[in-house]
Amino acid sequence: MIARTLLYSGSGPMMISALLATSAWIMRPPGSMPPAPPVLAGLRIGVLDNAKPNARLLMERVASQLAVRTGAVVELVTDKGPGANAATPCTGETLDRIGKEVDLVLTGSAD
């Protein structure tokens, strides 16, 4: 399934498309999925850089715009851990940090 949203920045509209993988987990599955928050105001946004070219820049811009529009706060920008690249999973320490420090995570970009 592909989700699309239109964001506006100082340079004009920008279309963002996201592929939503619903049939399989690439990393360890959660025990259960928490319900989606009804609003994002006051929530902490995290960005997980997947090491793809320009991924961090794109996701930081999306996180910043999301925070401005919803009242959320960009709390954490991190990578997957030492030695990680686009094809490797996060370290357990990185996943634990994300779980403790943020309420919403933006990650993933394709070539």
Image (tube, rainbow, N blue to C red):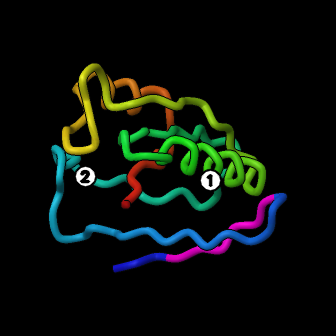
The kind of residue tagged 2 is Ser
Is the Cβ of the residue at disc 1 closer than 8 Å to that at disc 2? no
The secondary structure that dominates the magenta segment is strand
Q: Earlier in the sequence, mark 1 or mark 2?
A: 2
Asked if the stretch drawn in magenta spans residue 7, the answer is yes
SS assignment at label 2: loop
SS assignment at label 1: helix
Q: Residue at x 50, y 47 (%)?
A: 54
Asked if the stretch drawn in magenta spans residue 92, the answer is no
- Label ID, residue 32: 2
How far separated are the C-alphas under marks 1 and 2?
Answer: 26 Å
**Is residue 87 left or right of 58 when viewed as pictured?**
left
Q: Residue at x 68, y 38 (%)?
A: 73
User: Where are the magenta residues, as a range?
Assistant: 4-9
Residue 70 occupies which quadrant of the picture?
A: bottom right
Neighbour tally class for label 1: few under 14, some 14-19, many 20 plus, Cα within 10 Å:
some
Task: Quadrant for the N terminus, please.
Answer: bottom left
Quick one: 10 or 27, which is closer to the camera? 10
The kind of residue tagged 1 is Val
Q: Residue at x 19, y 39 (%)?
A: 88
Residue 15 location in percent, x, y?
Answer: 61, 73
Q: To which residue does mark 1 refer?
A: 62
- Label ID, residue 89: none
